[in-house]
Image (cartoon, rainbow, N blue to C red):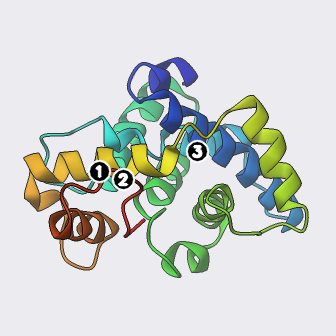
Amino acid sequence: MHEYVSARVSAPILHHSVRVGSFARLIAESEHIDIPEDMVWGAALLHDVGTAAGASSPLRFEVTGANAAAELLAAQSELSGAQVQEVWDAIALHTSPHIAEARGGLTRVIRLGVLMDFGEDILPDATELRRKQESEWPRADIERVLADAVVQQVLEVPEKAPPASWPHNLYTAHLQNPRHTGVNPAF
């Protein structure tokens, strides 16, 4: 799966995905949530593959990524149909505040892993855990790279940014200042 992802996304997005997997495993352990490791790693590694997969689809990157992940996992893993659906849910909902956390299980730990990678102190030793992960898997300007990948897709297929979605917020901020070169203000 690592090879599949690394062949499709940029190094910053791959590194972010690995960090999310590591954080999600630790969060699951700390919250006593029993999730098979292959499900955590499948969801974590594939959660942003939609920034590359299905670029011409009118669906949000989260949904195109979830679809690609489900197809890959159904063909190349021993996960059950219900487990593949859990991975799909975790990927499709990872940018949905409150919903993903309330959903529980895999969806919750992937969302919290993403938040932890972007600076929220989900675990008591979050700062040290981030430092350790970032020494192995550098951030490489992930906030800018990820936002730019999402906005680029929306510029090509505007339907990918429905109102009240994270892609829409990024796109709107881009339209307000298209010459901005740093991290998208809506990140």
Looking at the image, do the residues carrying marks 2 and 1 touch, with CB atoms under 8 Å apart? Answer: yes
* Left or right: 26, with 185 as reference point: right
Q: Which residue is mark 1?
A: 150
Q: Which residue is mark 3?
A: 44
Eyeballing the image, is 135 above or below 67? above
Could you give the CA–CA distance between mark 3 and mark 2, rounded to whole angstroms? Answer: 18 Å
Could you give the CA–CA distance between mark 1 and mark 3, rounded to whole angstroms? Answer: 18 Å
Eyeballing the image, is 19 above or below 178? above
Q: Nearer the viewer, residue 172 or 77?
A: 172
Q: Tag 3 or tag 1, which sits nearer the N-term?
A: 3
The N terminus, quarter of image: top right
Residue at position x 34%, y 38% in the image: 68
Q: Position of residue 8 (x, y in %)?
A: 38, 25
Which residue type carries mark 3? Ala
Q: Which residue is mark 2?
A: 147
The C terminus, quarter of image: bottom left
For mark 2, does the 10 Å Cα neighbourhood hold few (<14), some (14 to 19), or many (20 or more) residues? many
